[in-house]
């Protein structure tokens, strides 16, 4: 890793995180439409595991970037936060492309909505009878889902980018704050 190679390093680190998040997204969608509540618990566990891995990788990449700067230079909060957002942006592009391909080309948006509606009605059927007000809200939500036009591929892509940037911005506040170092130009080591 070189100090003057900011965008190249951000793209490489973002590619690794983007692939992990994209695979996670596809896995969550696949598990989401399976039968049984056990898979829902697996999906929640997977979500937290991927969130922890996402945080760890962002922290690791930013710490590695900060080690390129000497004690005389320091590593500011802005440098760390900027690097984190750049990495998250590149990761978001990969996630958005995979989401768009999965949703629009592999599964198809109408099939996705049909599977979602079937899953939701099956979940309510397993829970037992609901009150008439809940049934009214459920039928209205299903009607809205089925009548909503499919988002464009570009909107789906931007959704992936913004979600990744949001996680990066939240994690970045913590990571950049922890990793930031003030410059210490007069900090010399004397061995006597």
Image: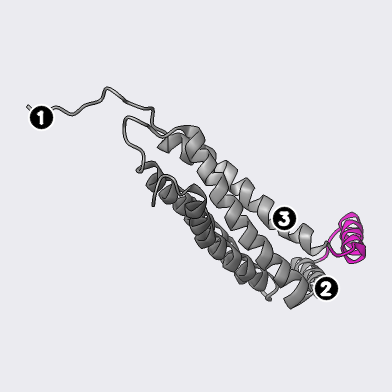
Image quarter in which the C terminus is found: top left
Q: Kindly identify which residue carries mark 2.
A: 114
Q: Position of residue 159 (x, y in %)?
A: 72, 55
Callout 1 crowding tier (Cα within 10 Å): few <14, some 14–19, many ≥20: few
Residue at the spot 58% in from the left edge and 57% down from the top edge: 91
Please, is residue 178 above or below residue 156 in the view?
above
Identify the mark nearer the N-term, 3 or 1: 3
> Under tag 1, what secondary structure?
loop
Callout 2 crowding tier (Cα within 10 Å): few <14, some 14–19, many ≥20: some
Gap between marks 3 and 2, in whole Å? 21 Å
Q: Kindly identify which residue carries mark 3.
A: 159
Q: Kindly identify which residue carries mark 1.
A: 191
Identify the mark nearer the N-term, 3 or 2: 2
Is label 3 or label 1 in front? 1
Q: Position of residue 39 (x, y in %)?
A: 61, 71
Q: Are the residues flagged by discs 3 and 2 in contact, CB closer than 8 Å?
A: no
Q: Is residue 166 magenta?
A: no
Range covered by the magenta-colored residues:
129-150
Question: Can you tell which quarter of the image residue 105 is in?
Answer: bottom right
Q: Residue furthest top?
A: 186
Q: Position of residue 156 (x, y in %)?
A: 75, 60
Gap between marks 3 and 1, in whole Å? 55 Å
């Amino acid at each position: 890793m070189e100090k003057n190679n900011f965008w190249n390093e951000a793209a490489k680190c973002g590619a690794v995180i983007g692939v992990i998040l994209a695979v996670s997204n596809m896995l969550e969608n696949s598990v989401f439409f399976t039968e049984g509540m056990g898979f829902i618990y697996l999906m929640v566990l997977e979500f937290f595991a991927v969130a922890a891995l996402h945080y760890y990788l962002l922290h690791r990449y930013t710490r590695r970037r900060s080690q390129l700067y000497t004690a005389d230079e320091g590593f500011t909060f802005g440098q760390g936060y900027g690097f984190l957002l750049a990495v998250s942006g590149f990761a978001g592009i990969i996630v958005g492309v995979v989401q768009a391909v999965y949703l629009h080309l592999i599964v198809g948006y109408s099939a996705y909505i049909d599977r979602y509606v079937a899953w939701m009605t099956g979940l309510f059927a397993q829970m037992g009878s609901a009150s008439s007000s809940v049934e009214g809200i459920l039928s209205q939500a299903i009607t809205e889902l089925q009548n909503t036009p499919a988002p464009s591929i570009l909107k789906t892509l931007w959704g992936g980018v913004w979600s990744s940037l949001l996680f990066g911005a939240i994690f970045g506040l913590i990571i950049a704050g922890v990793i930031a170092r003030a410059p210490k130009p007069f900090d010399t080591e004397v061995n006597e």
